[in-house]
């Protein structure tokens, strides 16, 4: 249920973004209005509730006293709208109509200035006939809790969480990729300074070691899959470059390169990029044009860094020279492109997509190691060393049935430093009481199970479809336990001997 709330909030934010680009009656805007209204009604019927509400405080979403990480990153446009309206959140009542949602999106796109106060915002909503979306009073510090959905909330609760320091960085990364996608859609040049700035912030944040790179945030819409992918590739690239001892100025370029590496996908028609069925040969060619298209966009936008341009151009080139695009004779693959290639494949394998189940890092490493000739051996070894089998941010079940989150790699690959979040009965432990435990080889405690974070509350959700089996070296992907459905027909493509997912 919690995930459904998050999905709805992100969907609402994505509707605001779509409306900023298009007009009221555009099929994309209408589709989000319909989707949101239907999903909200279904959820409320299931839940037997009369309204759906959430708060906004300090640039973050809060619901029932909990700080929502994924939506706070992906739903920035909605947070900003709430700030312009000077409200502390939104309450949606039944019978919510599509027209209410459409008007909400329109106001979100057109109301660019901050309103004087909440009363003015409420009057604006009333004047536009939005009957079933209520604006909540601003949230205040502990002791003045007005919002009924957030009554257990106190600012200090969430400020103490691990996510707070990195949230702004993630938001900036997310915004960079998403706004550049919009610019490419409109055939405009991209904002390189924003990308560089975000890259710098990422490297600065990772300096303290507080890099929760594999927070598997949930994204309910396709656009966000591409965005989340680039953000995670950037974070992995910075972490990996640091492990390899590359200097800070290179790390900053690497992070920027990660953010921009799939820029060319903005030129691939969405019908192809998100096609559910098998791609034709012609469509495959269009997809394979994205590295060169990305490099061209960068050049046209004034990018001068060989590292960033070559990473966009060469991130689907294998170490043995295979892959795509076909490069001219003079092309030499640089280390940065090899590094982005490694991060790109690892991220794609371990991330969840609507048409595939995620792979555990262990399995992804096995597959990558068997794909001889694809990856730069030292870079792949460094990735395995850095993340271990349980990358920071992973959730695990310990052998005493307590649930924990991985904080950092431990002394060896399969014994990370964890923070215990739930007792053996599954009850959450308050943040300030969560013990940090360093697992040790041969110790009493070990990891019993890896959970796919963000999927079904840390549990395992059945994937809708599974990609067609077949990694280049004849390795068959096995269906995760309980997977009923067979392989999807031909979605994905052979890139570096492995199936890439879009
Ligand atoms: Fe790519
Ligand atoms: Fe990629």
Image (cartoon, helix red, strand yellow):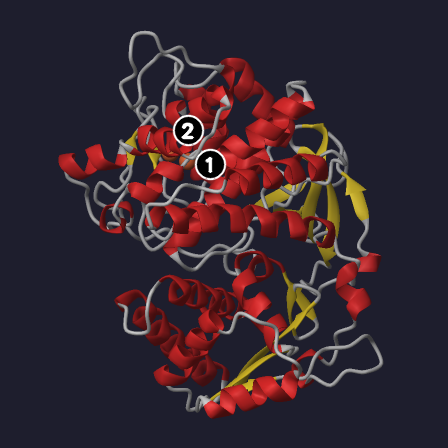
Residue linked to disc 2: 312
Disc 1 under 8 Å from ligand 2? The reply is no
Disc 2 and disc 1 in contact, CB within 8 angstroms:
yes
Q: Which of 444 and 76 lies nearest the eye of the viewer?
A: 76
Q: Position of residue 123 (x, y in %)?
A: 55, 91
The C terminus - image quarter: top left
> Quick check: 194 above or below 84?
above
Residue linked to disc 1: 260
> What residue is shown at x 45% (from left), y 70% (from top)?
109
Q: Which of 326 and 197 lies nearest the eye of the viewer?
A: 197
Image side of residue 167 versus residue 46, left or right: right
**Which image quadrant for residue 424?**
bottom right
**Which image quadrant for residue 142?**
bottom right
Q: Position of residue 398 (x, y in %)?
A: 68, 47
Q: Label 2: few (<14), some or many (≥20) within 10 Å?
A: many
Image side of residue 133 versus residue 433, left or right: left
What residue occupies the far top of the structure in this picture? 330
Q: Which of 496 and 24 lies nearest the eye of the viewer?
A: 24
> What residue is shown at x 44% (from left), y 25% (from top)?
309
**Which image quadrant for residue 84?**
bottom right
Q: Secondary structure at mark 2?
A: helix
> What residue is shown at x 33% (from left), y 69% (from top)?
29
Q: Position of residue 240 (x, y in %)?
A: 60, 26
């Amino acid at each position: 249920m919690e995930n459904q709330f998050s999905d709805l909030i992100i969907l609402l934010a994505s509707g605001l973004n779509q409306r900023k680009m298009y007009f009221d009656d555009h099929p994309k805007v209408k589709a989000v209005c319909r989707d949101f209204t239907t999903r909200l009604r279904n959820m409320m019927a299931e839940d037997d509730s009369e309204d759906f509400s959430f708060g906004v405080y300090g640039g973050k979403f809060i619901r029932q006293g909990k700080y929502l990480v994924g939506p706070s990153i992906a739903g920035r446009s909605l947070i900003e709208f709430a700030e312009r309206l000077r409200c502390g959140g939104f309450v949606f009542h039944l019978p919510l109509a599509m027209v209410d949602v459409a008007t909400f999106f329109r106001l979100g796109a057109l109301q660019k200035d901050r309103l004087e106060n909440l009363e003015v915002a409420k009057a604006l909503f009333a004047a536009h006939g939005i009957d079933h979306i209520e604006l909540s009073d601003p949230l205040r510090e502990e002791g003045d809790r007005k919002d009924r959905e957030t009554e257990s909330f106190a600012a200090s609760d969430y400020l103490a969480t691990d996510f707070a320091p990195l949230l702004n960085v993630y938001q900036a990364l997310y915004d960079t990729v998403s706004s550049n996608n919009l610019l490419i859609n409109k055939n405009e040049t991209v904002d390189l300074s924003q990308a560089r700035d975000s890259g710098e912030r990422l490297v600065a944040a990772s300096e303290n070691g507080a890099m929760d790179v594999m927070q598997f945030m949930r994204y309910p819409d396709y656009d966000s899959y591409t965005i989340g992918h680039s953000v995670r590739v950037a974070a992995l690239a910075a972490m990996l470059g640091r492990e390899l001892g590359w200097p800070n100025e290179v790390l900053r370029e690497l992070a920027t390169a990660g953010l921009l590496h799939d820029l060319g996908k903005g030129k691939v028609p969405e019908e192809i990029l998100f096609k559910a069925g098998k791609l034709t040969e012609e469509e495959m060619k269009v997809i394979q044009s994205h590295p060169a298209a990305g490099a061209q966009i960068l050049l046209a936008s004034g990018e001068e860094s060989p590292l960033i341009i070559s990473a966009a151009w060469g991130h689907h080139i294998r170490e043995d020279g295979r892959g795509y695009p076909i490069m001219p004779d003079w092309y030499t693959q640089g280390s940065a492109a090899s590094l982005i290639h490694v991060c790109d494949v690892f991220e794609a394998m371990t991330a969840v997509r609507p048409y595939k189940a995620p792979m555990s890092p262990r399995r992804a490493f096995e597959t990558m190691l068997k794909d001889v000739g694809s990856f730069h051996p030292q870079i792949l070894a460094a990735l395995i060393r850095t993340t271990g089998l349980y990358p920071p941010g992973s959730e695990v079940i310990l052998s005493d049935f307590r649930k924990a989150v991985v904080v950092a790699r431990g002394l060896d690959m399969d014994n990370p430093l964890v923070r215990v979040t739930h007792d053996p009965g599954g009850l959450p432990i308050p943040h300030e009481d969560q013990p940090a435990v360093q697992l040790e080889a041969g110790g009493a405690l070990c990891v019993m199970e890896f959970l796919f974070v963000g999927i079904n509350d840390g549990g395992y959700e059945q994937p809708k479809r599974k990609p067609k089996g077949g990694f280049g070296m004849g390795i068959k992907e096995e269906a995760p336990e309980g997977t009923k459905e067979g392989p999807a027909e031909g979605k994905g493509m052979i890139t570096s001997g492995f199936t890439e997912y879009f």
